[in-house]
Amino acid sequence: MKKHIAKYYPLVPVFAAYLVMFLIGRNMSGMWQLMGMLAFYCALGQAFNIFLGMTGYVDFGYVAFLGVGTYGMAIGITRFASFEGLGIGIIAIGFLLALAMATLLSLAVGAVALRLRGAYFAIATIGVNEGFRYLIEGARIWNGSEGIIFMADMNQAFGREMASALSTFWADVMVFIIAALAAVVTIYYMRSKIGYALTAIREDEDAAKVMGINVTKYKIIAFITSASFAGLVGASSWAIKTPYVFPPEVFEIHYTIEAIIIVLLGGAGTLLGPVVGGLIYGLSKYWLAVILPGFQLLIFAPLIIIIIVAFPEGVIGLLKARVNGTKYKIIIE
Amino acid sequence: MIFEQLAGNLIQGLVLGAIYGMATMGLSLIFGVLKVVNVGHGAFIMVGAFITLWLFTTFGINPIFAIPFAFIVGMCLGFFFYYSTMKRLIKAPELSTLLATFAIGVLLEEIVKLIFGSEFRGYNWVVGKVSLGVTVLPMAKIYACIGSILIAVLLYLWFKKTRAGTAMRSVVEDDEGARVCGVNVGWIYALSFAIGIGLVVASGVLLTMFIPVGINPYMGGAYTLKAFVIAVLGGLASPYGAFFGGLVFGLIENGSYTLFALLPGVEPFALTRFLSFVILLLILLIRPTGLLRAK
């Protein structure tokens, strides 16, 4: 039994990090917004890591899942705002819609794009993201390029005070919960047959296939799991926090790049990596915006190149090699 | 009436398509030789556009003469980024090269923004017009189209007739085999990357001859996505395939725009873009070797 629990010890530093962030945000004035932003980056990294880190496939259209998640919540709130007595249940409906839409889209995309490999996969996923955006704008689905603005609906459904509490406080709390859940799922996958299969696929897909692993099945499992979490992150951090949704914003490829940087910075395929990556990325972005406004990208771009060339394993990748053989080994994953 | 409009737009599409094709040849060349997808493609087009703008507005230099200048600047950039970054990533996983080229693109955008600012710019080069009955083509567009075809032909001859060109083709076929036959594969990688980037920067000049407005540090993103579709149409690894893909894409883009505009209650521009990505996915699934080659 003890051994069974010991498998999950690496969750301890992850949860500790989230707890510290939460407490700092609650108890230090003016810090909640920053902690909310950091939680968003950690959650984004943690969700993306399940697919990118574990399979080694680069999904350049990942932000599409956050986008449909945002739309799911927006549609849930606008359609059900007038129903009396649903109260906070509307949020639950919104999350269910976000989850369902992200899952469906990922199933459709995965079934098509996961037949492709390497650069072809990356290009196809960019195509899906952009194509989906232009379909929404072109065919005027969900209000087309005018987007959905649902501040009024939120006020109607929850009352002004509760709506404001939802967007300034509870949205971030939900992001923390989603990030923690994604960590739990990550370690569960790592310790089960799914994780071993995915590692085999990442190292050598052809060999894995020959060994009798159903590569398509495991790739799709990782893809859908990762996309569902992205949908939830979009629903809470984008929809509830800022009650509007415009296609050019929620399908912006820069968010995908941010997610890739976070995963790579912390260490792809590790459990703690996305948290460390999210913290480093979020904090440096925040400080650069304060110290050198307008120059963040000019500094980030060469930094990314240096990291890719010099430290492709990321912070936790390096740390893992260090602690191997010491007593800290069981909590660093 | 609608047929005249369609015919006019298709002619415009064919001219634009030749430029699109030339703009994608660099992407295909780099992918063919190095197996690297240049995600920063559009940023290099943007550099070409700014070179044209700068030469024209400050020195009054004819955009045609900006083409060789842009090509040389592009080659220098290509050598610089190859030896500083890409060389170390040739054997690295896809993730690294995709992210590295993206970061290079962002770096260029930010440097240009630092120098020129981020407002939209344009220039006005008046060289007359030609009327074709169904549509009117400014001479600048015709020069750009001729320039594209000329560069494509030159590249073709260079591949066929020169030793370096032959060596490049051998690396595309099989880099190990080429190495065994005495080809300096490392140098061929560097040269291909440099020529590829040179072509892309030069194509930025041609694109501004076609559309001399809307020049801005972030103008490249849309061209990157179009270039992917075009490259896939042509088989991704073949520069001539890319040229052909560009012609097809120009026709589809302009033709479908005319037809979508007839539908009520839609935004034809966005639907045109949607269609191009549907084509991208279909080609990737059905004929990943491109329209031309039956492998």
Image (cartoon, coloured by chain):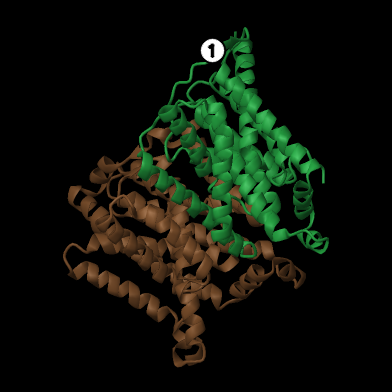
Residue at 80 percent across and 61 percent down: it is B182
- Corner quadrant of residue A282: bottom left
- Corner quadrant of residue B143: top right
10 Å crowding of disc 1: few (<14), some (14-19), many (20+): few
State the image coordinates of residue A32 (x, y, percent, origin top left).
Answer: 23, 63
Query: Residue beneath label 1, please?
Result: B128
* Residue type (three-letter) at the residue carrying disc 1: Gly
In the foreground, B170 or B99: B170
State the image coordinates of residue A266 (x, y, percent, origin top left).
Answer: 45, 70
Residue B194 in view: yes
In the foreground, A197 or B218: B218
- Corner quadrant of residue B36: bottom right
In the foreground, A328 or A113: A328
Rendered hue of chain A is brown
Supply the letter of whichever chain is green. Answer: B
Q: Which residue lies furthest to the front in this view?
A: B59
Residue at 78 percent across and 62 percent down: it is B179
